[in-house]
Image (tube, rainbow, N blue to C red):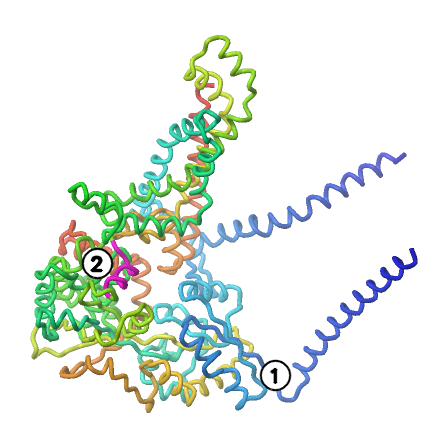
Amino acid sequence: MFKNTDLKMQKNLVLVTFLFIPTILISLFMIYPLIRLVALSFTSWDGLNPTKTFVGLQNFKKIIFDSPEVWVSLKNNGVYFVGHLLFIPIELFLAFLLDQRVRFSKMFKTITFLPYIINTVAVACMFIFLYSSQDGVLNSMLQFFHMDKIGWLSDPKIVNYSLTGVSIWKFSGIHIILFLAAFQSLPTDMIEASIIDGASTFKQFYHIVLPNIKPVVEIVLFLNVRGALQIFDIPYVMTSGGPNHASETFTIQTINTAFQYQNFGLACAMAIVLMIIIIIFSIIQKKLFNLKG
Amino acid sequence: MVKKKLLKKLSLALVGATLLSIVAVGCSNTNSASNASDKKVTLKMALWGDDEYKYMTETSKIADAYKKVHPNVTIEVEKIAKTEYDNTMKIRSTANQLPDVFPIRQANLSLYGDTMVPLNDLKATENNLYAKETMIKGNVIGLPEAVFNEFVFYNKNIFKEYNLEIPKTWDEFLKVCQTIKDGKKYTPLAMGLKDSWVNYPLNEYMPMLEAGDGQYYNKMATKDDPFTKGQPFYNAYTKIQKLYDAKVFGDDPLGYGWDQQRAMFVAGKAAMFAAGSWYKTDYNQNGGKDENLGVFLLPTRNTTSDPFYTTAMTEFFWGVPKTSKNQKEAKEFLEWFFGDYYTQLVSTLSIKPTMKGVSYNDKFFTQAFDGVDAKSVTVFYDDKYNKVKNAMKFDVNGIGQQMVAGKTSLDSIMNDLNAQWKKARGN
C-alpha cells in the first residue's frame, strides 16, 4: 500500500501535529518562566527598574547563611507537614469506613469532600470568625464551660496549630476520596479469598488493602510535602503571617520579599530553594516508603 | 443538493466579506491616526480610588471635559482594585505596558525613580504645595492629589457618659483610655492588631511626631544606631508601650482584625478609633452616624507647652511613565487636571487639596484643629530609607504586634533593631 518512508513520514507528521500545541504551551507557561526565574535569582532586581544587576550566588548565600527568618518560616511549614502526616492514617481509616461499611456512605462521602470544593478564602474567613477573640464561637464555648479564652490566632505558640487545623479540615477530603477510589479499584476476589481463609478486618487491611493501594498512598504523601511547603492562602488570609511573623510560611516570606520589600531577585532565589527542598523531601520520603519492599 | 451548495457559497462569501471589512477597518484606523494633521491620541489612565473613578466616569466625565479643550485626545479610564493596584502596575511596568497617566502610592514612589518622566517644569508642579518635598533623586516624578491627616475618631455619647474632655497630651490620652477601661462597658480604643497595619498611626507615625520631622525615617537611614535610648524612635516607642501595657484594646487585640475593629466602633462597643481622614467615608458607608462622631488629633506631646505635631500624608502621586508614547500629551493633561477640574473634584469628594489656592472647608475635620496650634509634618520616605528598610525587612507594624504580645522587653527589641539596622546599612 504505502512505501516504508511514506509511512514513517506520516507517523512523524501525526506525532508533530499532536505534540505541537502541548509543547508550545509547556514551553510558554512552564519552561520559559522557569528559565526566567533561574536567571532573575542571580540578580538584585527590585521588580521595576529596567536594569537587573547580576549578583552571582549572593541571593542563595543570603538565604542559607543570613536569613534566620526564612528558616523560622520553614519550621512553620513543618507544623503543617507533620499535622497532615499524622492525619493520613485517620484519613485512611475514614476512607475504609466510607467504602460501603457505613450506612448513608454516599451522603458522608459528599460531606467529606465538601470542604475541598469551597473556596479557600471563604474557608479562611469562616474560621477567622470561629477563632476570633471578640465573640468567636470557640472562645464562647470555652467560656460557657467556665474555661479561659484561648488566643487561637494571637498566641505565637498556638497560631500555627490553629491554622494547621483549618488546612486539615479543608484538604483531608481530597485525600479520603483518593484513598476511597483506590479501595474501590481493588479486585474483590482477593478480599473474598482472605475472608474464606479467616483473615480479620485488620489483617485484610494490613496485608491486602494497604500493599495494593501503595501508589495512591505515595501520591498523597507527595501532595502532603508539596502542599505543606507551599501553603500560602490560609495563613495569608487569616493572619497575614502574624502576630509578628509567627505564622509566616516560606511562600508568604517569598511574596513579602518580592512585593513588600522590593527584592524580586532574592524572592526568585527563594522560590528555587523551595523547589529544591520539595524535590529532596519527596525523594527521601519515596526512599523511606520503599525501604521495606 | 443545489440548496446545500448555494448555502455553502453564501456562507463562504459572508466569511470573506467579514474578513475583508475587518482588514479594511484596521487599515483605515491606522491611516487616519498617522496621517491626520491634528494627531489623534488616546491617553490611557488607571487609578485605584473608588470615589475618584466614580467621579471621573459618572459625576463629571473626565473624558468629555478634556475633549472640549483637546478634541484630538481621548481619555480612557481604568479602575484597578485597591489591593491589586501596586502589583498590577509592577507587572505592567515589566511588560512596558504602563498607562500614560497613573497615580503612584507614596510607599512605592522611590521605586519609580527611574521609570517616570520628571515633571519639574510643569506649572502644576509649581503650584503643588508638596511636590518639592517629595522629590526622588532631585526630580518631581509625581504630583500628589490629596493630603491626609491622622485623627482619633471618638464616640461622643461615650465621652459624655464618662464626662471626658478631649486630651491634649499623651498622659491625658492614656488617662482617657484608662477611665473608659475602668468603666468595664466599652473597649477604650478599637485596634484589631491581627491585621498589623492598623497600628500605623502609632508604630509608624509616632517616631516622626516625636522628632517633629516627617522625614525622620530618612534621617535614621544615615545613622547606625537610631533605636538607642534617648532617640526619638525609642522615646516614641516607650510611650506606645505604655499604651499597649494599659491593655485598652480589649481582651485579646491580636485575636481580632480590621473588619471587627470597624464593626465594634460603628456598633458603639468601642469609644475611640485611630485612623486617617479617609476612614470617615468608610464609617458612613458602614452605617455610622455623624451625630455621635467626634474627632481629635492624637496628642503625642508630653506637656501642653510642647509643640503639637500632626502628620500630613500625601497620596496619589500622578505621573507619566517614560515608556508612554504620548508623554507631551500626558503632561499637558496633568497641567489641565490640576486646574479647575481638580478644584471641583476635591470639593465634591471632600479631599484635602495639595494645590495652592484651592480652598478646603471640611467642618467635621476642622473641629480637630480648634484650640490646638497643630503643626503638620509631611511624611515622606526617600530612597536611602527604603533601601535599608528592604534590606533588613524592617516592619514597624510587626514590632507593634510584638510589643502587644509582651513577651520581649522594649530594650531587647531596640537593641536587636540597632544591630540589624547597622548590618543593613553596611550592605
Chain containing mark 2: B
Residue at image position (18%, 59%) is: B249
Q: Is residue B25 magenta?
A: no
Q: Please provide the residue range marked out in magenta.
A: B256-265
Answer whether labels 1 and 2 touch (C-beta < 8 Å). Answer: no
Label 1 sits on residue = B40
Instruction: State the residue in front, B74 or B134.
Output: B74
Sequence order check: which comes first, mark 1 or mark 2? Answer: 1
Q: Quadrant of residue B245?
A: bottom left
The quarter of the picture where the C terminus of chain B appears is bottom left
Instruction: State the residue in front, A143 or A239.
Output: A143
Find numbered disc 1 in the image and state the secondary structure of the residue it sits on. Answer: loop
A287 over B81 or under it: above or below? above
In whole angstroms, how far apart are the C-alphas of marks 1 and 2?
A: 53 Å
Label 2 sits on residue = B400
> Could you say where residue B323 lies in the image, as x and y percent from the top left?
52, 73
- Which kind of residue does numbered mark 1 sit on? Lys
Residue at image position (68%, 44%) is: A19
Asked whether, in this view, residue B5 is left or right of residue B116, the answer is right
Q: Residue furthest front?
A: A103
